[in-house]
């Protein structure tokens, strides 16, 4: 693992140097929220990185729930449109946290790794370097360096897990902490902004709904499949209910479908008769809510399929630009994003366009709306940015998690795999992995369950 790690460090140093020399690095506004977030991060890190149990408990919270305002202290690359601008930080807080967790156990650092993790790392950094050489300007180069966080997270996570001994159960209780904090943060944010849908300042609407619903499924699965009792059991059940409620309030369609599918396929077969009745009544309530609010079965509002297809057909036949309306904006935008993404892939199938360049290059490939956005499909997002190497990431993050869930005999391991299993469903219409907070959690779960699954397989052979 030392070779891709060395290349990554060299790229980060070059990006920082070129960014400073050519004036491409800026700092976001440092406000009260940023200062409070930095202080909180300092105390959380100081509390947890020196002890394996506390590290296990805090990891999910830091990765997926911690306020992203903490990254305002890091330099980043500014990307602006006519309507808005966004700063892509050169580094992000999960990287700093992982680095601290590794440093305190410096004498135990083990650079050995499995072949798949090494292949993912080396292919990502080499294709990123190739794209850096092909950049049109210095802004794109520094954006690519900032966009190397997936490989940095992968390397740091692998090194951390080889030097620290995490506690299965405390990792899962860490999901409770993440749910409770996100519930508090999203409540404050939604009330202060008077948002029409439940939203988070860090995760937005769809991603908030997805992660809350999936973490709830993780906790419910663990409660059902194990004999955990007492306060821990009650805490997990309460947090699971809170997570499901927040997911419903976001009105994110895909997580509602994902929760129903996971309840039927994953939870139902392992339930007792009494629990089956309770869960059936809960899911019946969810279905009734969906029907009454027209979220799925009467597709009006932003996802009117008929109106969207009519608009596309009319515009193409008349040689006009597609006309958006309240009834068609969400679906047409997704179709346009996916078409643009596939054009990127077929133009650069071997290397992709590079991680972080989607928003700056999408107009070159035919996307017309001036907006900063993600591809709205996690699989397609990997494909357009990484080229054919995306297939390895699909397998590692999503498909292999399904395999481990189905084959492993370890209930703790299966419960952790449920997170990636759930995300593999949500990624069909959302690109949660485009956000570093979600991707860091996907990588943590993948590296962890793969490492433990190999240990389980070796133990069975012996």
Image (cartoon, helix red, strand yellow):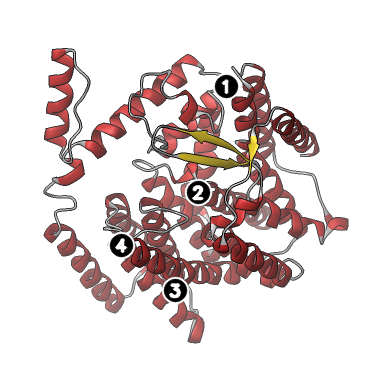
Mark 4 vs mark 2, foreground winner is 4
Q: CA distance from mark 1 to mark 4?
A: 43 Å
- Which label lies toward us, 1 or 4? 4
**Residue topped by disc 3:** 223
The label nearer to you, 3 versus 4, is 4
| Circle 3: element type | helix
Which class describes the residues within 10 Å of circle 2: few (<14), some (14-19), or many (20+)?
Answer: many
Residue at image position (26%, 58%) is 196
Q: Position of residue 415 (x, y in %)?
A: 49, 62
Residue 195 placement: quadrant: bottom left
Hey, which quadrant is residue 150 in on the image? top right
Who comes first in sequence, dot 1 or dot 4?
A: 4
Q: Secondary structure at mark 1?
A: loop
In the rendered structure, the answer to whether residue 251 lies left or right of residue 109 reads: left
Q: Position of residue 367 (x, y in %)?
A: 36, 24
Report the quarter where the C terminus lies.
Answer: bottom right
Residue 194 - label = 4
Gap between marks 3 and 1 measured at Cα = 43 Å
- Residue tagged by mark 2? 401
The 10 Å Cα crowd at callout 1, few under 14, some 14 to 19, many 20 or more, is many
Q: Nearer the viewer, residue 31 or 102?
A: 31
For label 1, the residue is: 351
Q: The residue tagged with tag 4: helix, strand or loop?
A: loop
Tell whether 101 sits left or right of 387: right
Q: Residue furthest right?
A: 107
**Residue at the spot x=44%, y=62% of the render?**
215
Dot 4: within a 10 Å radius of its alpha carbon, few (fewer than 14), some, or many (20 or more) residues? few
Circle 2 or circle 1, nearest the eye: 1
Answer few, some or many: residues within 10 Å of disc 3's Cα (few below 14, many 20 plus, some between 14 and 19). some
């Amino acid at each position: 693992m030392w070779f891709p790690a060395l290349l990554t460090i060299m790229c980060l140093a070059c990006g920082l140097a070129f960014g400073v020399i050519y004036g491409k690095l800026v700092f976001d506004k440092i406000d009260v929220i940023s200062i409070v977030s930095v202080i909180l991060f300092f105390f959380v890190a100081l509390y947890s990185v020196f002890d394996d149990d506390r590290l296990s408990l805090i990891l999910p919270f830091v990765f997926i729930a911690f306020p992203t305002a903490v990254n305002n202290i890091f330099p980043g690359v500014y990307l602006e449109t006519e309507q808005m601008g966004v700063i892509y930080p050169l580094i992000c807080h999960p990287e700093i946290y992982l680095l601290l967790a590794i440093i305190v156990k410096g004498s135990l650092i083990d650079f050995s790794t499995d072949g798949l993790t090494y292949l993912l790392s080396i292919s990502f950094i080499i294709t990123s370097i190739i794209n850096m050489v092909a950049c049109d300007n210095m802004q794109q180069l520094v954006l690519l360096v900032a966009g190397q966080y997936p490989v940095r997270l992968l390397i740091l996570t692998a090194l951390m897990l080889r030097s620290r001994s995490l506690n299965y159960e405390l990792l899962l209780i860490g999901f409770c902490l993440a749910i409770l904090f996100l519930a508090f943060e999203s409540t404050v944010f939604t009330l202060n902004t008077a948002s029409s849908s439940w939203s988070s300042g860090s995760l937005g609407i769809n991603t908030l709904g997805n992660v809350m619903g999936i973490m709830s499924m993780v906790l419910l699965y663990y409660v059902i499949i194990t004999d955990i009792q007492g306060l821990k059991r009650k805490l997990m059940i309460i947090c699971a209910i809170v997570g499901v409620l927040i997911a419903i309030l976001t009105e994110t369609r895909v997580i509602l479908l994902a929760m129903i599918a996971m309840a039927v396929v994953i939870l139902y077969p392992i339930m007792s008769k009494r629990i089956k009745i309770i869960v059936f009544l809960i899911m019946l309530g969810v279905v009734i809510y969906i029907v009454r609010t027209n979220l799925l079965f009467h597709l009006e509002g932003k996802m009117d399929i008929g109106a969207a297809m009519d608009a596309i057909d009319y515009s193409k036949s008349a040689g006009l630009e597609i006309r958006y309306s309240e009834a068609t904006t969400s679906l047409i935008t997704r179709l346009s994003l996916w078409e643009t993404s596939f054009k990127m892939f077929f133009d650069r199938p071997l290397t992709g366009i590079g991680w972080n360049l989607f928003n700056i290059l999408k107009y070159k490939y035919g996307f017309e709306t001036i907006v900063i956005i993600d591809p709205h499909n996690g699989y397609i997002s990997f494909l357009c940015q990484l080229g054919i190497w995306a297939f390895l990431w699909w397998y590692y993050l999503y498909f292999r998690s399904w395999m481990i869930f189905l084959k492993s005999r370890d209930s703790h391991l299966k419960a952790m795999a449920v997170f990636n299993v759930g995300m593999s469903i949500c990624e069909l219409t959302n690109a949660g992995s485009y956000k570093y907070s979600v991707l860091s959690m996907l990588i943590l779960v993948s590296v962890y369950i793969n490492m433990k699954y190999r240990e389980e397989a070796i133990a069975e052979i012996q």
